Image (spheres, grey):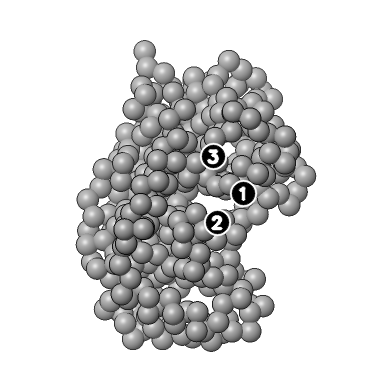
Amino acid sequence: MKKKAVVVGPYRVHNFGDDLVGAIIAKRLQQVGYDVVIPKLGQSNADWIGTEYAESYDGIFDKADTIVVGGGGIMSDTSGAKPGASYLDIVARAAIAGKTQGKRIFVTSVGAGPWKLPRSKMLAFGVSMMADKIGVRDQESFDHLASIGIKGPKVVLGADCALLSKDYLPFEPVGSGKIGIQLNTGQFPEAEANTAFPAIKDAIDAYVSENSSNVVLLSNGHRRSPLASVAPTCETLEYGNLDTYLARLSGLRSVLTSHLHIAITAYSQRIPTFSLYVREKTKRFYDQIGRPERAIDITKASIDDLQKFLEAAECAEWSEKDEETLIRLQRQARSLLSFIE
C-alpha cells in the first residue's frame, strides 16, 4: 500500500505562484512513492499533476503519513489580503486534535518572517518545532527563523522551488515572443504615497495601448489585467490552470511585473524579467539572481525608471551570467526538495 502525503498551503486556484510551488512539491512526493492530495488546488490541476482532488481538509490528516507545509510566504504575515501565517492554523489545529502524532512533517520553499503579530510568530515557531526539516528560500528567512530560536541542521537554506518548474512539470512552451506586463497597480495603495505614481500609471497605460500587438497582459489570478481596459485588443493571460498558464508564460520574450512568482517562473524559463515591486520578498529575489538593478520599489520609482525598464524589456537577452546564476539557484532549490522522503 502506497504512503499518503498532504501538502498544506495557500492553494485555492486563485494564485498562479502559490499553486505552482504546491504542484512541484507534489511531483517530488510522487517521485519518492507517495499518493498526494493538495486540498483546494482544483480539479483540473489535480488531474494534470496526478494528485487526489479534495475540496476541504476534512479527514485528510487522518489518512496522511507525511505532511508537507509550503510554499510561499506562509511563515510570514506581511503579504496578501489574508496573511500567510494564517494557513499554519490548519496544521496547528490538526496537532491540537492529535492528528499529526507519529507523522513526518516538513516545511519547505517558504519565506519566513518578518512578523507583524505575536500570534503569527508563535504559529511559525510552533510549526517549526514540530517539523523534521524546514527549507527556506532566502537568507533573510533563514535569519528570521534564527531570531526566534529555530536554527541548526533542521533548517536548510536554498532557493524557491518555482525555479524548478521545467524539471518537474510537463508542459510545452507556446511561443509568442511578446513582452509580458503584469502591473496591477490598484492592488497597492502604498504606491499612492509616491508623487510620481499617477504619471507612472499613465505611462503604463500609454505603452500597452501603443504596443498592443507586442504585449501580453498578465494576471496572477483568474481576473483579467486591469490594463486590458485601456488596450482591449491586447492579448491577455489569466490563471485558470497550471499547464495552460505555464505554456504561454514560457513563450514570452521578457516580463515586467510587480509580483514575485511570475518573476521567478519567467526567470526559470530563461526569460529576462524586471520589477516595480512593493513587497520586500520581490527585492530579495532580484538580489539573489544578481540583478538588483532590475527591481525598483514602486513607492519610490520615477517615470524615468519605468521608461528604462520598458526599453530594456524590448531588447533584453539572456546572458552567460544569467545562465550560471540560474544553474546555481536551481541546485539550491533542489536542496529544499531532496530531504522530502
Residue ID for mark 2: 284
Is 72 rendered above or below residue 263?
above
Q: Secondary structure at mark 3?
A: strand
Q: Quadrant of residue 91?
A: top right
Instruction: Give the alpha-carbon distance from disc 3 to disc 1, as whole Å.
Output: 10 Å
Q: Which residue is mark 1?
A: 140
Taking the spot 41% from the left edge, 37% from the top edge, the residue there is: 334
Q: Amino acid at mark 2?
A: Arg
Depth check: give the residue in front, 163 or 192. 163
Residues at circles 1 and 2 in contact by the CB criterion of under 8 Å:
yes
**Judging from the image, what secondary structure is the residue with disc 1 in?**
helix
Give the percent coordinates (x, y) of residue 330.
Answer: 39, 44
Nearest to N terminus: mark 3 or mark 2: 3
Q: Nearer the viewer, residue 335 or 189?
A: 335
Residue 260 shows in this picture: no
* Residue drawn 36% across the image and 64% down it: 272
Q: How many marks?
A: 3
Residue occupying image coordinates x 65% and y 33% = 151
Mark 1 to mark 2 CA distance (whole Å): 8 Å
Callout 1: few (<14), some (14-19), or many (20+) C-alpha neighbours within 10 Å?
Answer: some
Query: What amino acid type is highlighted by mark number 1?
Result: Glu
Q: Is residue 128 left or right of residue 334?
A: right
Residue 262 x, y percent position in the rendering: 42, 58
Secondary element under disc 2, as helix, strand or loop, is helix
Q: Can you name the residue that lies furthest to the right here?
A: 118
According to the image, label 3 marks what residue?
157
Which picture quadrant has residue 1? top left
